[in-house]
Image: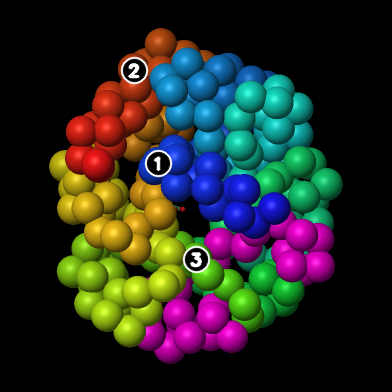
Amino acid sequence: LDMDVLSALRTARLVPVVVLDDAADADALAGALVAGGLPVAEVTFRTAAAEESIRVMAGRGDILVGAGTVLTVAQVDLAVAAGASYVVSPGLSRAVVERCQELGVLALPGAVTATEIQAALELGLTTIKFFPAGTSGGAKAIAALAAPFGHVGVVPTGGVGPANLAEYLALPSVVAVGGSWMCPRALVAARDVAAITALTADAVALAAQTTG
Ligand code: 3PG
């Protein structure tokens, strides 16, 4: 199951990080991402709308929905019950990872140092979120960490956008790149499907150009 989700993320190459203020906007957002060619989303637990938004989006059946900004075991339970297929955290919490493993969903915790990556490996993980990527050394840091950790998959997120996407996607250890630039919060709240679809399609085209 983890492998299925990881291979879907590897295929997508991009993970839109979403903040929804109102679950009533969730279906339009999902439709826009799908129409733009990116049937993937990370719905962050930064708003009260996250749980219901995950339920709405996962219920469509045409988009792989994960939960983001998951800080607690209780949030893991809510996210998975709502239909989340993977659980992303900004940092590494043993309790969160172990709950994901109990429930059989992929945990994608943040790790940016060798020590944090070793801690993730000890929990049985193969892939980490490199967050915040831009201020943690960026692509250079990921390339340096790949010397000892060449077998560890990395999802750089934070400060990634069209201008630097290519340098991350060029690294063999990078599974996918996450970011919010495809779905700015104001466009999501405005249900501006056309604009989100266009930003998403641009990102997909850029990613296709910069990977083999
Ligand atoms: C995240 O949670 O991964 C970040 O908020 C996304 O970072 P970005 O807004 O710089 O893309």
Task: Find numbered disc 1 in the image and state the secondary structure of the residue it sits on.
Answer: strand
Q: In the figure, residue 148 lies in which quadrant?
A: bottom left
Q: Can residue 59 be seen in this view?
A: yes
Q: Percent position (x, y) of residue 46?
A: 59, 49
Asked whether residue 132 is drawn in magenta, I would say no
Q: In the figure, residue 99 lies in which quadrant?
A: bottom right
Foreground: disc 2 or disc 1: 1
As rendered, which of 33 and 181 lies closer to the eye? 33
- Amino acid residing under circle 2: Ala
Q: Name the residue under label 2.
A: 198
Q: Is the residue at mark 3 in contact range of ligand 1, meaning its CB lies under 8 Å from it?
A: no
Q: Percent position (x, y) of residue 35?
A: 47, 16
Numbered badge on residue 14: 1
Cα–Cα span, label 2 and label 3: 30 Å
Q: Mark 3 points at which residue?
A: 127
Q: Percent position (x, y) of residue 70?
A: 63, 59
Cα–Cα span, label 3 and label 1: 15 Å
User: What segment carries the magenta color?
Assistant: 99-122
Residue drawn where x is 37% and y is 49% of the image: 177
Q: In the picture provided, is 153 more to the left or to the right than 29?
A: left
- Amino acid residing under circle 1: Leu
- Amino acid residing under circle 3: Thr
